[in-house]
Structures are given as structure tokens and as C-alpha cells.
Image (tube, rainbow, N blue to C red):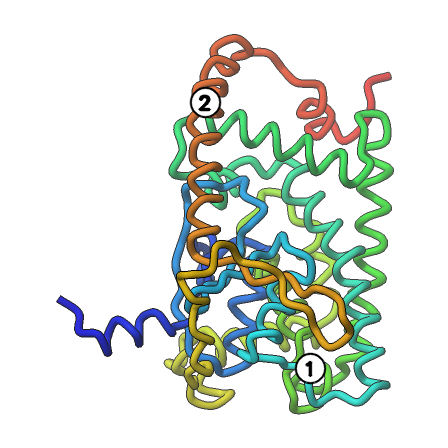
Amino acid sequence: MATVAEQEKQESQLVLLVREGGFGLPTACPACLPWFLYLKLSSVSFQTQYSGVEPDSEDLPAVEYGEAVGFASESGGILEFLKREKIADLDAALTEGERAELESCKAMVESWIVDASLYEIWMRDNDKAVRKLYFAALPMGLSYALDLKQRHSVMQRLGVTTENAKSRGDELLRKAGMAYQALSVRLQDQKLFFGDRPTSLDALVLGHLLFHLNVSLEVSNLREEISKYPNLVTYAQSLKSQLLGGDDGVPMGSAFGNPKAPPPPPPPPPTSTTHQSSSPDTSGKEKPANKSRNDKDKLFKKRAKYFVIAQFVAILMYVVFAGIDFEDDAQDDDGSDDE
């Protein structure tokens, strides 16, 4: 049985909740990988916990820190959570000019590059890789239904229809190519985007590059675009070896110093409090309290109930619609509209 000291130590550890790894990556989820790399670049000690139960969850990745939980789906996301809890802030030392340039580059990546990545993963003929990334542990009927649901969601987000699929895909690829060129010019022959200091831009770009250079997609136009810029490829391969370990036996994360434990989390609120109220900050506005583990457990239990219902409905859908060709899938296969 764990001692009180061991239990307190376990409670104070930082935990990153992500989707499963694969293709030589600690997590093969394009949304989770940048945050794994962010903590590695910050030299913060943390544990990785894998979740394959809810592949369609928008709350992944998530961070647990003592009694507090930060979700990617929340306003400000994990970045603001790490700053607020004083765990890590890679951008703290940047000047105002550097910070403005960093935010501009991140906006370009999070729009042009991320949109092109979503299109390539979900809108092209990459079913095998997608099933391995998201649905490997699910029954066939459920994986088919969730795959169809996610594809439809991405189509709506990107404004893709069966009529404009090819032209929209070409536009997204063109914008991604422009973004890669801008990043290549910004990086030049440096090891990192802002000299010798890792930033949130490095974590974001590196996560994207490693995903598309390592994950075996059947169709990968973005990998071809990335390969046009040798300094981006060298940048990704070098940091992968330093942060994740490589064939040369480099220990994981050793290049940026030994991992240090995050500061002790604040104590939980008194149990006599009837509810967690928001506390006013210095400006007089209310500051929302962090979600606790209990809040997280309730949310996951609620989603688990939905998941069971969805599984039953998905199997019915599969039985009813098995063998029917969906128009959007046929459109992806042809790459053009039927005349």
C-alpha cells in the first residue's frame, strides 16, 4: 500500500492524456503530439496516459495537475492552463516584437497548415491509417460510423462539398505550401525558430512535421510539399532524435536539460465549501475556477454513456447501410465530379 508521502507525490505529478502512439511517435494524434513536444521542450517532468475509449473526444489532449484539469477544448486550451498553473511558458522570454512574429506564424500554421492536414487525413483515401490512429480498438460497425461522422464534421468545417472537393483540396494544398515556404525562410539554418530558445511555435510546427513525415498515409501530398524544404526536414529529424530518442541512442529529451518537476499544485479548496465559485481578480472580473478531477470524471462518465448508445446505433446503421456507397467517399476516390 502506498505511503502518504508517495500518494502526495503521485497526486502532484503532471499527467498528459493523449491518444495512442504509433509509427515511431509517442502519440500518433496530430492534435496531441505538439503538446507532448511542448512539455519535452520545457524540460518538465510528466507522465503520459493513453486513452483509446473515446476517439472522437474533443477534450483530448488534456492535462491533469493535482486536482486541476486542463482540456484542449477549453478557452485558452492547454497553453493557458500551463501558464496559469506556472508549470511552463516557452514564450516568456520573447520580446514584444518576437512575440508578435510568433503569434503571426502560429496563426498561419493553425489555419492554413492545420486545415490542409485535416483535409488530407479525413478527406482523401487514407482509411487504413485513420482507422489505426483513431479506431483500432473499436468494433467494425462503430469505427465505420465514427469515421463517417468525423469526415462529415471536417467537411463542414472546411466548407467542402461534393461539388467543390477537388478545387477546395487544391486551394488548401496551395496555402499549406505557402506556409511551409514562409516557415523555411524564417527558420533558415537555425536549430530553432527563435535562435537557441524553444518556443510554442517549435512545438506546433514540429508536431505537424513529424506527423506527416512519419505516419504512413496512403495519400500524402503534404509530405511531398514538406520535402521541398530540406531545412524543415533536417529541423524535424534533428529534434526528433533529441527529444524522442533516435537510432543513435540519444536519451529522450536530454538535449534540453534534465526534466524538472513542476511546482507543487495549490491545495484543493476546503470541503466545507458548498460549491466552487469563481473568484474575482484584481480587475473586478470573475475568474473561472479550474476544473477538478471530479468534474473530469463526471464529464467522461457522461461521454461514456453516450459512447455506449452510439455503439448500439452505429451497429444498426452499419447493418442498414452496409454495401451502400456514400457520395462523398466516391467523390474522394474519383478526385472529380461525375460529368
Task: Identify whether 174 is placed above or below 165.
Answer: below
Task: Identify whether 84 is placed above or below 180.
Answer: below
The secondary structure type at the circle numbered 2 is: helix
Please provide percent x and percent y for residue 330.
69, 22
Mark-to-mark CA distance, 2 and 1: 45 Å
According to the picture, the residue beneath numbered tag 2 turns out to be: 141
For this rendering, which residue is in front, 305 or 97?
305
Furthest toward the top, the residue is 320
Amino acid at dot 1: Asp
| Image quadrant assignment for residue 94 | bottom right
The local crowd at label 2, few if under 14, some if 14 to 19, many if 20 or more residues have their Cα within 10 Å, is: some
Please provide percent x and percent y for residue 170.
83, 44
> Which numbered disc covers residue 284?
none
| Image quadrant assignment for residue 286 | bottom right
According to the picture, the residue beneath numbered tag 1 turns out to be: 91
Amino acid at dot 2: Gly
Please provide percent x and percent y for residue 43.
49, 83
Task: Identify whether 225 is placed above or below 233.
Answer: above
| Image quadrant assignment for residue 119 | top right
Residue at 71%, 19% in the rendered image: 327
Residue at 45%, 73% in the rendered image: 244
Q: Is residue 333 left or right of residue 138?
A: right
Residue at 43%, 73% in the rendered image: 267
Q: Is residue 309 left or right of residue 115?
A: left
The secondary structure type at the circle numbered 1 is: loop
The local crowd at label 1, few if under 14, some if 14 to 19, many if 20 or more residues have their Cα within 10 Å, is: some
In which quadrant will I find the C terminus? top right
